[in-house]
Image (spheres, rainbow, N blue to C red):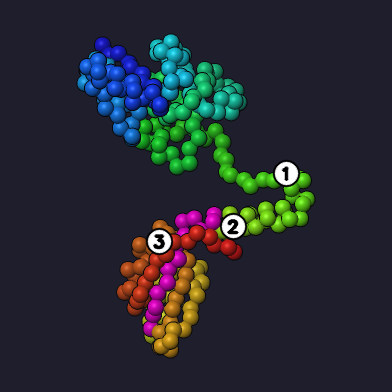
Amino acid sequence: MKLKLGIPKGSLENATIDLFRRAGFQIATSSRSYFPTIDDPEIECMLIRAQEMARYVEDHDLRGKIIATELVATTKRYLEKHGVTAKVEFSWGATEVKPPVLADAIVEVTETGSSLRANNLKIIDTVMESNTQLIANRASWQDARKRRKLEDIRMLLDGAINALGKVGLMLNVHKDNLSAVLAVLPALKRPTISHLSDDQWLAVNTILDETTVRHIIPRLKQAGGEGIVEYPLNKIVL
């Protein structure tokens, strides 16, 4: 026999756990899990939003198929398009922890899918893809000062997006080793090369994908590069 115990997540969480402690039950939570442990083998705990508690208490048997999501209308349109009949319920959050106890499946907004994988969930289909857009109303766009400001913001945002996943790399190299160093750098990159105070030495500056740098730096050192510095980038304005 297992009794499922819902604990309200949020402002009531600590007070509830403390009440159970005074009643003789030791409940331990983890920031990485929505399933607290309890020193009673006949009880299973789960953190649930207080707003949803009554609904799940009423329907622990989960008759039929239940899909939990914050995107109710989108999910219903998707199911209708594919001829699927299911019960779609609004989720107040922590949607990824609800299967299989509180829902048969979920529709969730995710960027990397890491939270889904951490909860042993598998993505079976993509309902839609979205991205962030900078928008303005027509009146603001017609105003010359506001339009100039919006264009400045757009340029800076584009620069920040261009810099994602990129790092800067600079190093010094003797003229005799320049060809060897350039051979290490990706063929499509065009590094900036400038003279140092010693005319036998050059400074090389370039931008690379962050994922490639750990492989390239050792090879640059072997090719004769010195004073190699990797630095983060906030913006790349093209």
Number of other residues with Cα within 10 Å of mark 3, as a class: few under 14, some 14 to 19, many 20 or more: few
Q: CA distance from mark 3 to mark 2?
A: 25 Å
Residue type at numbered disc 1: Asn
Residue 154 lies, in percent from the top left, at 63, 54
Residue 102 lies, in percent from the top left, at 41, 20
The answer to whether any part of residue 20 appears in the image is yes
In this view of the protein, which residue sits in the foreground, 203 or 106? 203
Looking at the rendered structure, the secondary structure element under dot 3 is helix
The tag earlier along the polypeptide, 1 or 2, is 1
Number of other residues with Cα within 10 Å of mark 1, as a class: few under 14, some 14 to 19, many 20 or more: few
Which residue, given by chain and number where applicable, does mark 2 sit on?
A: 156
Looking at the image, residue 121 lies above or below residue 57: below
**Image quadrant for the N terminus?**
top left
Q: Which mark is residue 212?
A: 3
The tag earlier along the polypeptide, 3 or 2, is 2
- Residue occupying the far bottom of the picture: 199
Number of other residues with Cα within 10 Å of mark 2, as a class: few under 14, some 14 to 19, many 20 or more: some
Tell us which disc is closer to us: 3 or 2. 2
Tell whether label 2 touches label 3 (CB within 8 Å). no
Query: Which residue corresponds to the image point at 22% horizontal and 17% vertical from the top-left?
Result: 24
**Image quadrant for the C terminus?**
bottom right
The stretch of residues the image draws in magenta is: 160-174
Residue type at numbered disc 2: Leu
Prevailing SS of the magenta stretch? strand
Looking at the rendered structure, the secondary structure element under dot 2 is helix
Which residue, given by chain and number where applicable, does mark 1 sit on?
A: 137
